[in-house]
Amino acid sequence: MNTRVVADPRSLTEQSQAATRAVLNGERKDWRAALAFAGPAVIASIAYMDPGNFATNIQAGAKYGYGLLWVVLLANGVAMVFQALSARLGIVTGRNLAELCRDHFSKPVVYLLWGVSEIAAMATDLAEFLGGAIGFSLLLNVPLMVGMAITAILSYGLLSFERFGFRPLELAIGLLVAIIGASYIIELCVASVDWAGAAGGLLTPRIVDSGALTIAVGIIGATIMPHALFLHSALTQNRTPSHGAAEKRMLIRFSNRETFVALAFAGFVNMAMVAVAAAAFHAGASDVAEIETAYKTLTPLLGGAAASVFLLALIASGLSSSTVGTMAGQMIMQGFVGFRIPVLLRRLITMIPAFVVVALGCDATHALVASQVVLSVALPAPMIALLIFTGRADIMGPFVNGRAVQWGGGLAAAAILALNAVLIAQSLGYEIVS
């Protein structure tokens, strides 16, 4: 069957639709059946490997060694649950999270949520765009402004794949994800990681001082991304039309598997970032806090090849996450207010904060970390909205959340709110953690 060009970026080609229909009809049951439904979680997972993660993970590993690995593990586990809920919402209702907010909340609440979500999207774009720009600047030895221009052109080129449907874009993003993962496998092989220390950091929760708390909140903001919660529901809504509860249940099962695999991979990458930073910097260069300094310090410690691999991963992260961030911003705006602007204009608008940061001479890595803290502060809003909708039987029918999921998700949202409150109190001069 010939494929056709589709206008809706959430559509599959006729060939892909035929493949998914064959699985749902029971005509295809081999191991490749799951591949027919793969894509949404891969796209969403890039939000968990963006340059903001590089910035917070480098600081975590350099200053606190393996001590904050438990934060990465915990945040990744919470992310799996909420991304699975977001995907399920889109599959069951055929609506995305932003659209349901518009349909079920009052106008003041809708506009408040939209404002918070747009701020989060801008913070996300700042981190992603700056990360790619830093990578190109260091790799090519050009000014940061030139790196920003290269990132802008290439990320817009990736966005152009949308016009052909999701498969070409998913393959491009998947390739960049593979590059990031391969890069950090190489880094782990080169760095002298203390595996016993890493295991202790994973299994021993502790916050030793206020600096660790700030980075921990940044890690959470960089790991559980507000725009990814909105995006995943949009990627699954009406992607594969289903008939009846049995087919929806099958779609949810495939979605849950993909979400687990994609986010487990993202979690591995994040833990590898912290472990490599701990192995390379903690003992002799614990003051490393900037991506640029990390690159220059890696060269004498691990060799020029390892430093180049680090930059390759950063560039792949910046390009892919910048593309996905723009997609998410479009879907958030369209879902909340029914307004869509051209992708080029959206891309230009989201680049402005990054250009302002560079023009003012601000430290790019510090701006990245600050953006992740902003994301963590904005995070409870979509988490709570998602729990409300997936916990309502009139919306989800037989797929409504059970008590364990509802209570567990509520506790996770409350914990993030509490961490944010402590962080805000400390920023106002109250010494919560010495």
Image: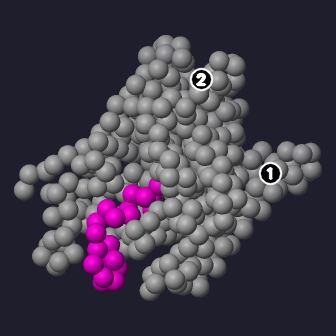
Most prominent secondary structure in the magenta stretch? Answer: helix
State the count of labels: 2
Q: Position of residue 193 (x, y in %)?
A: 53, 46
- In this view, the residue farthest toward the top is 142
Residue visible at 60% across and 40% down in the picture: 122
Magenta region, residue range:
231-251
Q: Is residue 339 visible?
A: yes
Q: Position of residue 112 (x, y in %)?
A: 69, 55
Is residue 70 covered in magenta? no
Q: Residue at x 68, y 32 (%)?
A: 366
Q: Is residue 240 left or right of residue 59?
A: left
Say whether disc 2 or disc 1 marks the residue closer to the N-terminus.
2
The amino acid type found where label 1 is placed reads Leu
397, above or below 11, in the image: below
Confirm whether the magenta stretch covers residue 246. Answer: yes
The image shows residue 82, relative to residue 322, as above or below, that is below
Q: Is residue 176 left or right of residue 103?
A: left
Residue pushed farthest right? 430
* Viewport quadrant of the N terminus: bottom left
Residue 178, numbered label? none
Residue bearing the label numbered 2? 355
405 vs 317, left or right, is right
**Residue drawn at 70 percent across, 19 percent down:** 360
Local secondary structure at mark 2: helix
Q: Badge 2: how crowded within 10 Å, few (<14), some, or many (20+)?
A: some
- Residue ID at (41%, 74%): 92
Q: Nearer the viewer, residue 424 or 116?
A: 116
Question: Disc 2 vs disc 1: which is toward the camera?
Answer: 2
Residue 360, placed above or below residue 386? above
In this view of the protein, can residue 189 be seen by the observer? Answer: no
Label 1 sits on residue = 423
